[in-house]
Image (tube, helix red, strand yellow):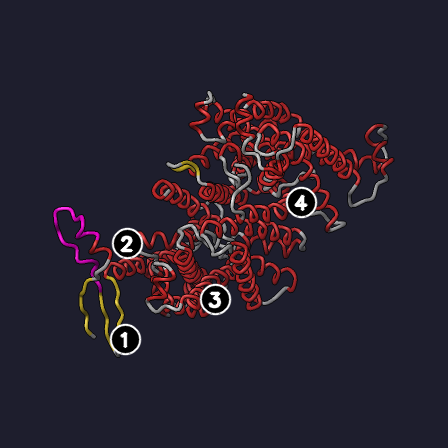
Amino acid sequence: MTAQTSDVEVRVPAAAASGPRLRVVGLLAVLVTLLVLLVLSLLVGSKAIAPSVIWDALFHPSADIDQFSIRDYRLPRTVVGLVVGMALGVAGALIQALTRNPLADTGILGVGAGSSFAVTMAVGVLGIRDISGYMWFAFAGALIVTIMVLLLGSTRRGQSPGVMVLAGVCVSAVLDGAGSALQLTNPDAFDAMRSWTAGSILGRPLDVVWPVLPFFAVALILAFAVSGPLNAMALGDEIAAAQGVRLARTRVLAIIAITLLAGGATAIAGPIGFVGLMVPHVARWFVGPNQRWVFAYSILLAPSLLLASDVLGRIVMRPSEIPVGIVTAFIGAPVLIALVRRKKASGL
Amino acid sequence: MSIGVTSRSGLTRHRSTGGAPGGRLDFGRRVLVLRRWRIAVRLEWRSVIVCAVLAVAVACMAVLALMTGSYQLSPGQVVPALVGGETGLVHDIVVEWRAPRVVAALVFGAALGVSGAVFQSMLRNPLADPSIIGFSQGSYTGALIVILLINGTYVQLIGGALLGGMATAIAVYVLAYRRGVQGFRLIIVGIGVSAMLGSLNTWLILRADLEQAIAAAAWGAGSLNGVSWDQVAIGGVCIAVLLLLAAMLSRPMRQMELGDDTAASQGVRVSPARLGMVVVGVALTAIATAASGPIAFISLVAPQIGHRLVRTAGITLAPAAFVGALLCLVADYLAQHVAPTPLPVGIITVMLGGGYLGYLLFTEARRRL
């Protein structure tokens, strides 16, 4: 395994060739950023609430109205943003590593749309209203679309980034259409899904997070377990196989992790795009292509991005708010355009 | 008028004489030439026949759509009503209620089909579709701004959709430009721009009043509900003019498929022709979008089906128009009468077209790369 890592590090561009110590320092800096954003997410809102009240709301609860709005609104959305952001970031890093496609993202490739459609089906048609029930549908939808897009996007000579993105866009379009057909023919479903389809971390009680957390934990362990083999596979399947990587097993494990992360995130927050696209690229600028570090940075960077977008969405149009999915699209789409304009995509 | 059957030399002949099975000579495709008053039109027999068959299919589908509804009519009532032979209730149902919708489906479907054909030919990519690369979204943004912010009239709505579409086309082109425009880069840039405009549209709807928002959202799914004769007339006239322009551009279009240099050496003025194609293509999409909201994927599918039916070397406009009209009619019929509750036609076309796009990607990817 060490031999593989050193092989990979030969390819690290000069700017990113930071030593392990610098990477740890960078990681700490990102962690501090995340903590600051967590606090900001509690502080900023349509009503200005003093920090002392927030402190009391968390640690000395009482029946105060401001404390109530902190505990029931800002705290859940902050926790949801943290959890969903982590899942989306790692899912994005994984799917980029697995497909070796710098344009890959669970949103762009339609994985989110797949779980959305499955959840719409579960909630609207089958009447399952509990997340521990419909998250299974989200997982199934994510799994089916991931496999479908991988098949559609791969060609005899390997995988083509453009074709894969188009395949994802096509699959999302079809599933969105089918989903809205379901919602329009079924007013109950429409009502139940309305807030969810916008892709927001607002108004999700903490109860929807707990059932999904064990799956996220499993997926994160899987992600780090396959990071070594994925490093080797970045050099090509043949070289990886020669180094003793079991290609099929790595791919299956990576797909399972992507499914759990993307499906779980969608089950909690609805479809949120572009987070998984941007974050791994930023991580690679810092640490180069070593997946272990990319995952570690993505875990912290993605929730930072999501929380920052959410806070931004609260500030820009005060007192009304912009759902976080819209903000991430506005930040993320230019990144997609910049990426496709670059001559060589970073580190894949 | 003289009708002559000649054969087209060129690629077909070369290829088939080179490796013809059984040594049979292929003299190319049969061509119908019409000459009158110094004007000569060369039409391929296969295209003529295919278009005629498609026209008949469109007519049958239109009559079927006029017959069906909560008050069922027979073909014997519909056809006389159309030519003015019926009065009273039947006349009202057919001419006043159902016909605008059917004519709208027909005209806008044809417009979308031709628009798609123009873009697919210009970008030399079967996936270059106005609804994928963001032009429909841009038109929708323009129209939304007119509806929500200035509460404009229908003509202003068309203007807004046109402006939005054109601005998006320019933005996508400029953003994708990097020592020339490469097809896939343009498409991915278009997807990005489309995503941004999509969220802009969602946000515009979110911050609007509830009533306006509901109207705008219903329109945004791509629906022919409540299309009036006025809208069909204004849209129809604009589209007729644009289709004529597109027909005039079809020759340079075919030659530019061979590459700009080749076309230039044949006497095509490449830059004005391309500008004309962009304007006509975007305008066709924008006008259809202004009237009915974004009806996705007809512009993607129609040229491809037409292309497979007439088996020409490049994308041709007339079959694309007929297939577009037919598809739009069929999709609207399915949306209105076959779905359990009436749906916006855009949802049906997205599902049909998306499935087709998947198939196309699958085969294209396997064949070409």
Q: Residues within 10 Å of mark 1 (few under 14, many from 20)?
A: few
Indicate the quadrant where residue A52 lies: top right
**In 3D space, how far apart are the residues under numbered discs 1 and 3 (Cα atoms)?**
30 Å
Q: Position of residue B112 (x, y in %)?
A: 43, 58
Residue behind mark 3 = B235
Secondary structure at badge 3 equals helix
On screen, residue B211 versus residue B111, left or right, reads right
**Amino acid bearing label 1:** Ile
Secondary structure at badge 4 equals loop
Dot 2 and dot 4 within a common chain: no
**In 3D space, how far apart are the residues under numbered discs 4 and 3 (Cα atoms)?**
36 Å
Seen in the picture, residue B233 relative to B293 is either above or below; the reply is: below
Q: Which mark is residue A323?
A: 4
Point out the frontmost of discs 4 and 1: 1
Pointer 4 with pointer 3, Cβ within 8 A: no
Q: Residues within 10 Å of mark 3 (few under 14, many from 20)?
A: many
Secondary structure at badge 1 equals strand
Region rendered in magenta: B15-31
**Amino acid bearing label 3:** Gly
State whether residue B74 appears in this view. no
Closer to the camera, B58 or B14? B14
Point out the frontmost of discs 2 and 4: 2
Q: Which mark is residue B39?
A: 1
Pointer 1 with pointer 3, Cβ within 8 A: no
